[in-house]
């Protein structure tokens, strides 16, 4: 136990993050289950309205700040980045361990707020309700999120320095894996945007504790100022969640198409473009909040512009599969599901970026469905795709492909049944964040609750067969997929300091699949 809690090995720290975030995901999922059971009937008959407010607030805070934002960077990024660069570890191993401890401290503060009575402000902490009127444990929760943000900054700094300074000889910028490019863009957002959130949350705590007029209009403050601060971080945070997922898909699809990525340079540049544009579109969350009409028009235009680099990635994935030898493994099914759901989520995002439509759809279930299509349908599909893709490397064992494919299909069906009805509910004007609703909406709400049950099965199954593979799984070998990245050139699992030969010289294409080794796992004949 002591060796794990004092380790500076990036692989062990990544597994510590995996265990911690799995606990948070389980808790957030249980809260969501209670919400969907409550919404299966029109009346507020399972929990009171105030309890419902606290449940969806904690669900949002835990899922956004303690799972969705850190999940891929801190687990897959931590584990794989040095391996993909041919490096023995991250640039600052002790800072890496410190980031996990700070993350755990933030989570414990937030759980303390939950145990002490909860939080009822919504995950956005909107003022002046959070600073003046709420009688819940706001300060504990915002300090917990503050520490989670500090942990993210530590990780971002570590990744940036590692990518700049610890690449293997010959690993030039245009030979970097696309997952590394996505982590680099994500790290820039983490380092530049997260301090704004930290400052904002500290101001919330100061106003609440000292009654200083910062956001409360009754004392000379501005609630609109809070929204500008909060969304200046929280919209780039969407790309903190989704950019690493895009990087995962850009690794999975070339491997299981046996083809080089189509338009590699454009895909790498699009990650940086998304990071830049992500800082310029926060105002589209505020079309009905009182900002100027001119500002809304500008933010609307920029919100459409950010779809361009995202479209570049989708066209690259489709182009990579074109004339490829498609192999429908579990990771590939998750990748295809990601493309479908990300396209739906992006398209509905453009609907919300349209001024006239947003006035009608704002604060309805359409927004809930859009956000979850991007985050749950998109990011989680990518997370599970990456987990299954690199599981043989991490564990040294193979999981059941049959159960993996079944779980992926169940997850996709459950997601569609859960959130497609919510798009319809939103267009009909049903407000979100209410424990009760008119009876005419019960059929669609019931469908959504039934879909959530199927979705839960899709989440539980991977936990079962992946854990079972640790005991009963066949040895994976070093490179069961016949992949080409540096991480596949070492043992499974990798040894301390990753490579037995630290003098690796990189001279080739990171995606040389025409000359790649043949897969060694069962089912390779499907290629």
Image (cartoon, grey):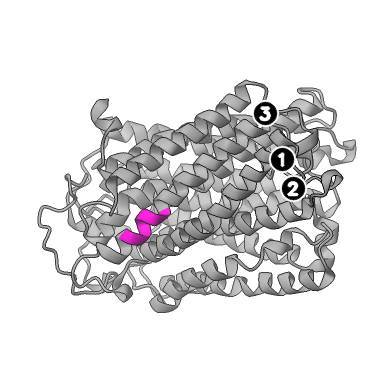
The image quadrant that residue 18 belongs to is top left
The image quadrant that residue 143 belongs to is top right
Q: Can you identify the residue that label 3 sits on?
A: 137
How much space separates mark 3 and mark 2, taking CA atoms? 19 Å
Q: Position of residue 15 (x, y in %)?
A: 34, 39
Residue at 34% across, 73% down? 260
How much space separates mark 2 and mark 1, taking CA atoms? 6 Å
Residue 397 seen anywhere in this rendered image of the structure: no
Instruction: Looking at the picture, tell me which residue is in the foreground, 312 or 219.
Output: 219
For the residue labelled by badge 3, is the local secondary structure a helix, a strand or a loop?
loop
Locate residue 323 relative to residue 438 in the image: left or right: left
Q: Can you identify the residue that label 2 sits on?
A: 214
Marks 2/1 in contact by CB < 8 Å: the verdict is: yes
Q: Which mark is first along the chain, 2 or 3?
A: 3
Main SS, magenta residues: helix
Locate residue 84 relative to residue 291 in the image: left or right: left
Crowd around label 1: few <14 · some 14–19 · many ≥20 (10 Å): many
Q: Can you identify the residue that label 1 sits on?
A: 207
**Quarter of the figure with the C terminus:** bottom left
Numbered range of the magenta stretch:
156-161
């Amino acid at each position: 136990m002591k060796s794990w809690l004092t380790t500076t090995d990036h692989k062990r720290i990544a597994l510590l993050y995996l265990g911690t975030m799995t606990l948070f995901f389980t808790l957030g999922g249980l809260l969501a289950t209670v919400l969907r059971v409550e919404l299966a009937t029109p009346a507020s008959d399972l929990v009171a309205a105030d309890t419902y407010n606290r449940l969806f607030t904690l669900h949002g805070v835990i899922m956004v700040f303690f799972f969705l934002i850190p999940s891929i960077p801190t687990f897959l990024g931590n584990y794989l980045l040095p391996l993909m660069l041919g490096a023995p570890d991250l640039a600052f191993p002790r800072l890496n361990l410190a980031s996990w401890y700070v993350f755990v401290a933030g989570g414990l503060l937030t759980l303390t707020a939950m145990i002490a009575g909860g939080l009822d402000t919504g995950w956005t902490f909107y003022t002046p309700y959070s600073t003046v009127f709420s009688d819940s444990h706001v300060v504990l929760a915002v300090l917990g999120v503050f520490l989670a943000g500090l942990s993210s900054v530590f990780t971002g700094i570590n990744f940036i320095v590692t990518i700049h300074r610890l690449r293997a000889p010959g690993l030039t910028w245009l030979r970097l894996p696309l997952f590394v490019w996505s982590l680099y863009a994500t790290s820039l957002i983490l380092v530049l945007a997260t301090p704004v959130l930290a400052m904002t949350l500290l101001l919330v705590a100061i106003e609440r504790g000292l009654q200083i007029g910062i956001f409360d209009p009754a004392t000379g403050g501005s609630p609109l100022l809070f929204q500008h601060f909060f969304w200046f971080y929280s919209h780039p945070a969407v790309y903190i969640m989704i950019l690493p997922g895009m990087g995962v898909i850009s690794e999975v699809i070339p491997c299981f198409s046996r083809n080089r990525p189509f338009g590699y340079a454009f895909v790498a540049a699009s990650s940086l473009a998304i990071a830049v544009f992500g800082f310029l579109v926060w105002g589209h969350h505020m079309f009905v909040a009182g900002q100027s009409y001119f500002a809304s028009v500008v933010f609307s235009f920029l919100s459409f512009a950010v779809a361009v680099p995202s479209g570049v990635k989708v066209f690259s994935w489709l182009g990579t599969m074109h004339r490829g030898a498609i192999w429908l493994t579990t990771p590939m099914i998750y990748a295809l599901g990601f493309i479908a759901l990300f396209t739906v989520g992006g398209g509905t995002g453009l609907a919300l970026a349209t001024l006239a439509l947003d006035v009608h759809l704002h604060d309805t279930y359409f927004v809930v469905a859009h956000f979850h299509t991007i985050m749950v349908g998109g990011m989680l599909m990518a997370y599970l795709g990456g987990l299954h893709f690199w599981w043989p490397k991490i564990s040294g064992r193979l999981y059941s492909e049959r159960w993996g494919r079944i779980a992926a299909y169940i997850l996709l069906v459950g997601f569609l049944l859960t959130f497609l009805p919510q798009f319809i509910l939103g267009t009909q004007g049903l407000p979100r964040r209410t424990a009760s609703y008119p009876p005419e909406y019960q059929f669609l709400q019931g469908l959504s609750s039934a879909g959530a049950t199927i979705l839960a099965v899709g989440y539980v199954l991977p936990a079962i067969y992946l854990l079972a593979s640790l005991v009963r799984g066949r040895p994976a070998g070093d490179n069961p997929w016949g992949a080409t990245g540096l991480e596949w050139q070492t043992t499974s699992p990798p040894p301390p300091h990753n490579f037995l030969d630290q003098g690796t010289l990189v001279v080739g294409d990171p995606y040389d699949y025409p000359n790649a080794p043949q897969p060694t796992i069962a089912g390779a004949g499907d290629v």
